[in-house]
Amino acid sequence: MKKNLRIILILTAILTILTGCSAENFFDVRSAMSPPALSEEQISIKNSIRECLGIDYKFSYLMIDGKLSSVLKFNVEGGEYMVVFCETNDKFMKSHCIFFEKKSGSWIIKDDVVGGNYRAYSASVKDINGDGLDEIIIDGFDESSSNLKRYVYQVPKNEIVLVQ
């Protein structure tokens, strides 16, 4: 009987440790449901977006590499880039595709591409024209004209250029 009780106590202790809850807030459900704290880099990116847009925004989650994400990271000609997708709602919904470049270890905003009343739903990085350089492809829906629309960008010589 003592052996069974000891096994039950050990299993309970192991399961409690594996829950990720600490002893001080074990019974606090809200603390278990809160998201993890953002890193300094993530806070910096979030503040840069708010500064750039000047109004509140929310992240857009697009289909990127088979999963939903609001961030597309890629490398072109040795440069490290990232596109963050978000939306603002000032009289009408605007999709923003904010291009960042990593310089000296920090992410710097290069450009904000606003599609107007456009809702992006997928993004990818591929060489679609066979020139050996990857293009950024953003597919979405233009809600004004009710048409599907594709934006294709290149990053030659550290610039963002709309190709199509």
Image (spheres, rainbow, N blue to C red):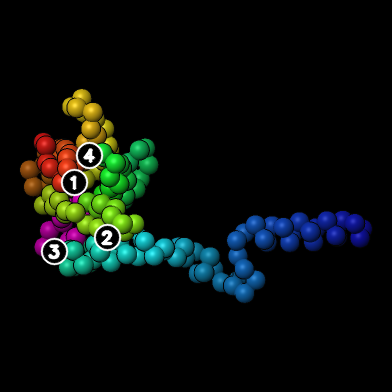
Give me the C-alpha separation between circle 2 and circle 4.
22 Å
Q: Mark 1, residues whose alpha carbon is within 10 Å: few (<14), some, or many (≥20)?
A: few
Q: Nearer the viewer, mark 1 or mark 2?
A: 1
Between discs 1 and 2, the one toward the N terminus: 2
* Residue 38 magenta: no
Q: Is residue 88 located in the magenta-colored stretch of the structure?
A: yes
Three-letter amino acid code of the residue under disc 2: Lys
Q: Which residue is mark 3?
A: 90
Q: Mark 2, mark 4: which one is toward the viewer?
A: 4
Q: Earlier in the sequence, mark 1 or mark 3?
A: 3
N-terminal of the pair, mark 3 or mark 2, is: 2
Circle 1 or circle 4, nearest the eye: 1
Q: Which residues are magenta?
A: 86-98
On the rendered image, what quadrant is the C terminus found in? top left
Give the number of the disc on residue 158: 1
Query: Residue lying furthest top in this view?
Result: 130
Q: Are marks 1 and 4 in contact (CB under 8 Å)?
A: no
Left or right: where 104 falls relative to 148:
right
Q: Earlier in the sequence, mark 1 or mark 4?
A: 4
Which residue in the structure is indicated by mark 2? 58
- Residue farthest toward the left in the current orientation of the protein: 145
Residue topped by disc 4: 136
Give neighbour class at mark 2: few <14, some 14-19, many 20+ (Cα, 10 Å): few
Give, as a three-letter code, the residue at label 1: Asn
